[in-house]
Amino acid sequence: MKAVVFERFGNPDEVLQVRDAPEPTPGKNQVRVRMRASPVNPSDLLVVRGQYGRLPSLPATPGFEGVGVIDALGGGLLKYLRGLRPGRRVAVLNGPGGNWQEKVVVSARHVVQLPDDVADEQGASFFVNPATALVMTRRVLAVPKGGWLLQTAAASALGRMIIRLGKFDGFRTINLVRRREQADELRALGADEVLSTQADDVVSKVKAFTGGEGVRYAVDAVGADTGLTAVRCMGSGGRLLVYGTLAGQPIPLDPRLLIAGQKRIEGFWLSDWVRQQGALTMLRLFRQIISLMRSGVLTTVVQAAFPLDQIREAVRLAEQPGRTGKVLLRC
């Protein structure tokens, strides 16, 4: 079978290659999945570069999530408790990575059965972005109806989910983007306000939107000066979740910005949050994601799909600014 492999950390365009690999055999409480598709997420590429929070032993295959069909079961009772059998279409949540290959073996706990009306394109991106959007806004920040949430990287796939989730849950969003021409598209999704970090006086406009108070809830995926702008937009008691570092640079923070009004900056990493949850919490989360996918809230726009053999073309497109959707690998 074919697998995308890297033997050293570095630029994905240089270190990723496609190889023939032996077909894996499932062990106790494991399933083997014939993969259909897997997205190229920023977190996957951070792993390849050696910049992610947890790194695999090399050589390794990337790919945290994807969709496929179970084609073999290992021993143990867990598969029966979860109703798994060959032919079941599942989302594959592969925490160590490894979905960028034709077949993968994972724990039976790491697959979620998909209903027929959830397409492969949505099932492939079932967890990373949908769960991050849902957990940050509903569970960690608990943004109330009518509250203002400010987000950076608002034109990203995850940013668009937060906009739609705001309309669904009743909170208002202030969305920061680089280019003004993205504003109309985001407003059509339900964005309440869209500001350009390059063209607008963001802080003064946010204060005007919020009656001079600033926002109490914010999420940042960029860092650097954009992250600092988010901090400066916070009001008394404001809380900022940092969940990404797209700029590759730290937030240049004056601590006095936090002292006045007792503002907080916290890190959010979905993997760590998941490790702290019980099985019932995760089951409820999976059901919520499926329901919100069916409602069109937590859906992913796909711009292009590539076969594994075109992995370098896929990662080049995935890293281009201004993309209109997610890049998938067809396995």
Image: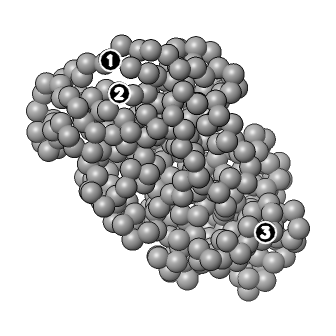
Amino acid under disc 2: Lys
Using a 10 Å C-alpha cutoff, classify the residue at mark 1 as few (fewer than 14 neighbours), some (14 to 19) or many (20 or more): few
Q: Is residue 170 above or below residue 109?
A: below
Residue 273, image x and y in percent?
Answer: 44, 46
Give the spatial CA distance, label 2 vs label 3: 41 Å
Amino acid under disc 3: Glu
Mark 3 or 1, nearer chain start: 1
Residue 266 in view in this figure? no
Mark 2 or 3, nearer chain start: 2
| Residue at x 35%, y 27% (from the top left corner) | 103
Give the mark count.
3
Residue 315, image x and y in percent?
Answer: 64, 35
- Asked which secondary structure carries label 1, the reply is loop
Q: Would you say 91 lies left or right of 198 here? A: left
Give the spatial CA distance, label 2 vs label 1: 7 Å
Residue 122 in view in this figure? yes
Amino acid under disc 1: Glu
Q: Which residue is mark 2?
A: 103
Q: Quadrant of residue 310?
A: top right
Q: Nearer the viewer, residue 158 or 136?
A: 158
- Asked which secondary structure carries label 2, the reply is strand
Q: Which residue is mark 3?
A: 181
User: Considering the image in quadrants, where does the N terminus appear?
Assistant: top left
Using a 10 Å C-alpha cutoff, classify the residue at mark 3 as few (fewer than 14 neighbours), some (14 to 19) or many (20 or more): few
Q: Which residue is mark 1?
A: 23
